[in-house]
Amino acid sequence: MTPSALSWLWPLFFFLLGSIPTGYLMGRARGVDVRQHGSGNIGATNVGRVLGRNWGLAAFACDFAKGFLALFLLRILVFPHDIAWTVEALLVVCGLAAVLGHNYTPWLGFKGGKGVATSAGVLGALLPAALVICFGIWAIEVLILRYVSLGSVLAALALPPVTAYLYRGQWIYFALACFICVLVVWRHRSNIKRLLEGKESKLGSKLEKPEET
């Protein structure tokens, strides 16, 4: 099955869906601008630091759903059967659009989250086996060293080789894995700097001043 020309409007929908700043909106619902507290980020980790663990988990779930739910439904309802590479390419572009919308939301001056939860949702819809392995890497690091940022970077770096091994010959999915890897590492560049300086916050640490952007 080949997507029609109008099907290529789907990425715009996914960008707008991904751009919904769920962590920021949760903070506003509590009368708090999460950008002014903790790390200054609107992602789930900072929402958890500022508003509490349950709010952080809720923010993660919402950001994950932005990458997973609509993409999964698009795949099984619109393209339910064996699909051509053009359809796979469309799904990958839609997934990347959701991540970019989250990372660079136009509603907050194109400053958003770091894309981990939304990327995980995209992987859950398209590359579930790779997600399981990369989540395991993230979880082991966080349990041992308690650096959420380091776990995210390590999982991102593992994603391309894991995808190449599990989805051999599917270059479109390998390209997706590489793109997500680069995005996650790039969005964590300030965290990497603090890790190298020994200044990065661990999971459960006290709030810090917002990071410079």
Image (cartoon, rainbow, N blue to C red):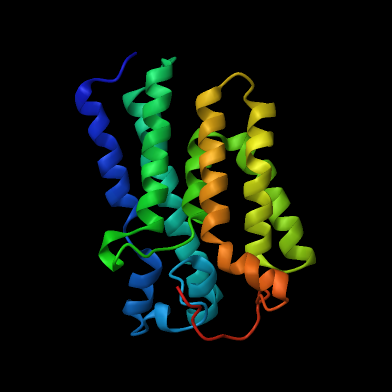
Identify which residue is drawn at 35% across, 52% down. Answer: 101
Q: Position of residue 183 (x, y in %)?
A: 51, 50
Identify which residue is drawn at 52% across, 44% down. Answer: 180
Q: Position of residue 44 (x, y in %)?
A: 50, 66
Quarter of the image for the C terminus: give it: bottom left
Choose between 25 and 42: the one closer to the eye: 42
Q: Is residue 18 left or right of residue 56?
A: left
**Residue 35 picture quarter:** bottom left
**Residue 161 picture quarter:** top right
Which residue is at the far right? 144
Q: Is residue 105 above or below residue 204?
A: above
Q: Is residue 192 left or right of residue 10?
A: right
Identify which residue is drawn at 53% across, 29% down. Answer: 173
Choose between 181 and 88: the one closer to the eye: 181
Quarter of the image for the N terminus: give it: top left
Q: Position of residue 181 (x, y in %)?
A: 57, 46
Q: Position of residue 56 (x, y in %)?
A: 51, 70
**Residue 140 picture quarter:** bottom right
Q: Is residue 132 above or below residue 199?
A: above
Q: Is residue 92 above or below residue 142?
A: above
Q: Is residue 47 left or right of residue 205?
A: left
Choose between 28 and 119: the one closer to the eye: 119
Q: Is residue 162 above or below residue 84?
A: below
Identify which residue is drawn at 68% across, 75% down. Answer: 202
Q: How many marks?
A: 0
